Image (tube, rainbow, N blue to C red):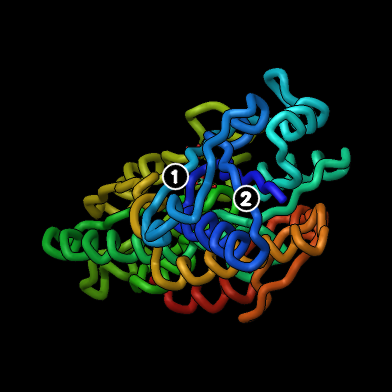
């Protein structure tokens, strides 16, 4: 059997560990062959592949990024579609595909699966926003990076007695902000699920300042104050029609400074959160998911993705994973909020 693997959407630490886990198990246990599609769905639609041998995946679990390249190409646009994908698979002798990606990628994989393409999924995203899996690999690495960066912001903030605002990623959910904010001991954590007023934010900042602390505010890129209609976006839409977020920290900083009289600086961590070496947790999770995806293929569980349930790997329908975003529940925010100010 020949299996095609693709990584699509934003890159994420751990992608290479998935590829390695899948190829090693497929070759060693089932004698399968592998090709890797270059640059996500673009490689699928254009039939652009490289052979993935056991030798090619040696030692790659610790590398960030993806050896296959990725893109935000939509397989149903630019000359794509299920017929084209099926024809390219037949040309290359590919029997089945493993798509490693986030919400956009898995939604496209579901459409292909509904059209009869033999495809299984592996969820990836630093945002941790996919339902039907407890954690996605990449998230743990992102919060480590964000926490380390904010530990640094704290020492410079304390030296100057400034308010520091750190903007983290996460798209429409606040998991990265919540976890890194708790880890670093932030005085305010602002997440998309919980719009709050500028007065409230300024109140928390003043409380921290009054206690002689240099206030640290963590804001998720998708956060909006209670009088904003939608999250701040100044970079247009991505290939799947979703707004590209980022820039809210710079919007908040002057407003906060005006209200509190405390000198305020904003830092946007951006793609640093997605780069570099995955944590040990992410390497292990990604490797296990890659190996489990081979089980999905061998068992013909088309239209499913592998997922983490507690400490065990499960197989769930794309539909269950894509039904809704996994956002931060109220009780997790309430718990963190006790520490604000
Ligand atoms: O989904 C992962 C993510 O990093 C989001 O947190 C962020 O909003 C988005 O991707 C950024 O996308 P891009 O790399 O296309 O700018």
Residue 295, position as x, y percentages in the image: 72, 66
Residue 189, position as x, y percentages in the image: 45, 63
Would residue 202 be visible to someone looking at this image? no
Residue at point 72%, 72% (across, down): 314
Residue 195, position as x, y percentages in the image: 58, 55
Residue at point 56%, 44% (across, down): 7
Task: Examine the rendered structure and indicate whether residue 238 appears above or below residue 111.
Answer: above
Of all residues shown, which one is farthest toward the right?
115
C-beta proximity under 8 Å, tags 1 and 2? no
Q: Quadrant of the C terminus?
A: bottom left
In the drawing, does residue 324 fall left or right of residue 21? right
Which residue corresponds to mark 2? Answer: 33
Of all residues shown, which one is farthest toward the top?
79
Q: Secondary structure at mark 2?
A: strand
Q: How many marks?
A: 2
- Residue 67 got which mark? 1
């Amino acid at each position: 059997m020949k299996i095609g693997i693709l990584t699509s959407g934003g890159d994420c630490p751990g992608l290479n560990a998935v590829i390695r886990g899948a190829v090693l198990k497929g070759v060693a246990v089932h004698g399968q062959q592998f090709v890797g599609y270059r640059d996500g769905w673009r490689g699928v639609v254009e039939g652009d592949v490289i052979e993935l041998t056991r030798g090619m995946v040696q030692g790659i679990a610790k590398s960030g990024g993806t050896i296959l390249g990725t893109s935000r190409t939509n397989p149903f646009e630019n000359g794509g579609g299920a017929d084209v994908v099926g024809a390219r698979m037949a040309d290359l002798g590919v029997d089945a595909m493993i798509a490693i990606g986030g919400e956009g990628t898995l939604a496209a994989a579901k459409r292909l699966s509904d059209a009869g393409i033999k495809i299984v999924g592996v969820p990836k995203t630093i945002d941790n926003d996919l339902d039907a899996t407890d954690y996605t690999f990449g998230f743990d690495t992102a919060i480590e990076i964000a926490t380390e960066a904010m530990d640094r912001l704290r020492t410079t903030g304390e030296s100057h007695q400034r308010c520091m605002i750190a903007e983290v990623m996460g798209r429409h959910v606040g998991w990265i902000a919540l976890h890194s904010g708790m880890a670093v001991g932030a005085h305010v954590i602002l997440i998309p699920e919980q719009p709050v007023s500028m007065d409230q934010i300024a109140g928390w900042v003043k409380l921290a300042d009054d206690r002689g602390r240099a206030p640290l505010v963590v804001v998720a890129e998708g956060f909006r104050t209670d009088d904003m209609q939608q999250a701040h976006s100044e970079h247009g839409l991505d290939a799947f029609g979703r707004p590209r977020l980022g820039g809210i920290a710079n919007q908040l900083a002057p407003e906060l400074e005006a209200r509190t009289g405390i000198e305020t600086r904003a830092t946007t961590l951006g793609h640093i959160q997605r780069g570099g070496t995955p944590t040990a947790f992410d390497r292990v999770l990604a490797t296990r998911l890659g190996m489990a995806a081979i089980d999905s293929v061998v068992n013909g569980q088309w239209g499913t993705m592998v997922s983490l349930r507690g400490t065990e790997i499960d197989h769930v329908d794309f539909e269950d994973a894509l039904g809704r975003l996994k956002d931060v529940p109220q009780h997790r925010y309430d718990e963190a909020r006790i520490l604000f100010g």
